[in-house]
Amino acid sequence: MVNKDFFKALDDLEQERKIDKQTFITTLETALTSAYKKMYGEAKSALVKLYPERNTIRIFSYKTVVDVVEDADKQISLEDAKQIKKSYKVGDMVAVEETTKDFGRIAAQTAKQVVMQKLRELERQNAANELSEKEDELLTTVVKRIDGDNVYVQIAGTHTEGALMKNDQIPGDKFQVGDRVKVYVKKIKDSYNGPQIQVSRSNIGFVRKLFELEIPEIASGEVKIKNIARDAGNRTKVAVYTDRPNIDPIGTCVGNRGTRINTIVNELNGEKIDLVEYSDDPLEYIARALSPAKVLSVETNDSLNMSQVIVPDDKLSLAIGKNGQNVRLAAKLTGWKIDVKPESYVRPSEETKETEYELTELTDEDSFDTMSDLDEFEEINGDDEEK
């Protein structure tokens, strides 16, 4: 069968959709062979071949040369085989081209179905491959639709939506259809309906990418982010450091008159950001991580991975933070369990102390629950957390 229009359509698909024509041809040969067998008998040994360079489709049936024919669909007599080619002998495989007008209509219908199905599969696959490169990236998207608490955004340059679920939004986020919004691509998974993209604004990856976007020194690697601890919508602690003595990592992140850090804070809906300079010395690192509270001393127990921090009495609530937020984030940032004690708990005043206290290496008996201490000392000193 000759069909120039059919093969021209495959060429157009390859150019417009950037889909390899040979992929279609291989799939079509399999599908057309199956269609031919259904039309003329499943037992028939047949093969449909496409020749794009000649714009032709040819059908071959294969039969084995035998002395006595028992299955006409699969066998051919030696006498009949020699009429095709005199050199044939028993056991040889004879290929005979079939010429059937009836198969043309079936072939056209099958080809159309296969092309449409394969086109959808390849488009989904190409979209998934393209989007996989965007995983762990920050994208500017457009709000396409809102379904209850969930927001669906259009990924630029694709026909794919990203799903921004309620738990991936920053508390206080408000969206309207058509809004441009920055999101972090946290996960891409393929499904029957195409790639599903999960995007987030509450993930710590969102903060990391904002820092890379707004601070060139972080993007270039001159200043590095050691770790991030985040309570989305409330407070984030970011530990930064640099190997270059002439660069101030904190000042670099803050920017001239706070322009850099303020841009990030605005994108986070006013979320507080504590910049912490990382140190290889755990004592110093822990003390810095409890910012903005002032720390008097730090003791550590390596075997328990625990630290004891002493702060001024009037800074206890600030060090612990509302509902333990500050100390919890500091612990997550540093990787150390942190117990905060007020100075008076360790060093009572001369009028009230009965026993001399000394700061010693922590033991199991020295550890205590931070939240219990918070309740006890807030009753005495009140909540003086600095706003």
Image: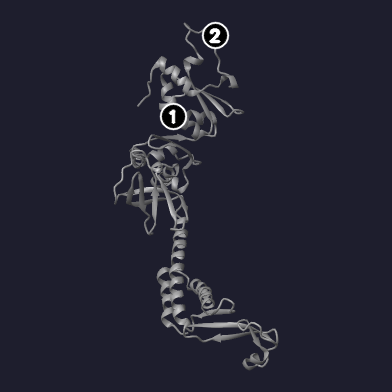
Query: Do the CB atoms of the residues marked 2 and 1 lie less than 8 Å apart?
Result: no
Quadrant location of the C terminus?
top left
* In this view, 184 is above or below 297: below
Residue displayed at 41% across by 41% down: 167
CA neighbours of label 2 inside 10 A, class few (<14), some (14 to 19), many (20+): few
**Left or right of 177, for residue 285:** right
Q: Which percent across, then down, holds residue 300?
A: 56, 26
- What's the amino acid at mark 2? Thr
Asked if one can make out residue 248 in the rendered structure from this viewpoint, the answer is no
Residue behind mark 1: 326
* In this view, 58 is above or below 141: below
Which residue is at the front of the view, 92 or 137? 92
* In this view, 345 is above or below 112: above
Asked which colour scheme the image uses, the reply is: one colour
Residue 233 quadrant: top left
CA neighbours of label 1 inside 10 A, class few (<14), some (14 to 19), many (20+): many
Residue displayed at 41% across by 48% down: 199
Which residue is at the front of the view, 306 or 128? 128
Q: Which percent across, then down, holds residue 249?
A: 44, 39
Residue 206 quadrant: top left
Residue displayed at 41% across by 24% down: 318
Which residue is at the front of the view, 38 or 368? 38
Looking at the image, is mark 2 or mark 1 earlier in the sequence?
A: 1
Residue behind mark 2: 355
Q: Which percent across, then down, holds residue 149?
A: 35, 44
Real-space Cα separation, disc 2 to disc 1, in angstroms: 31 Å
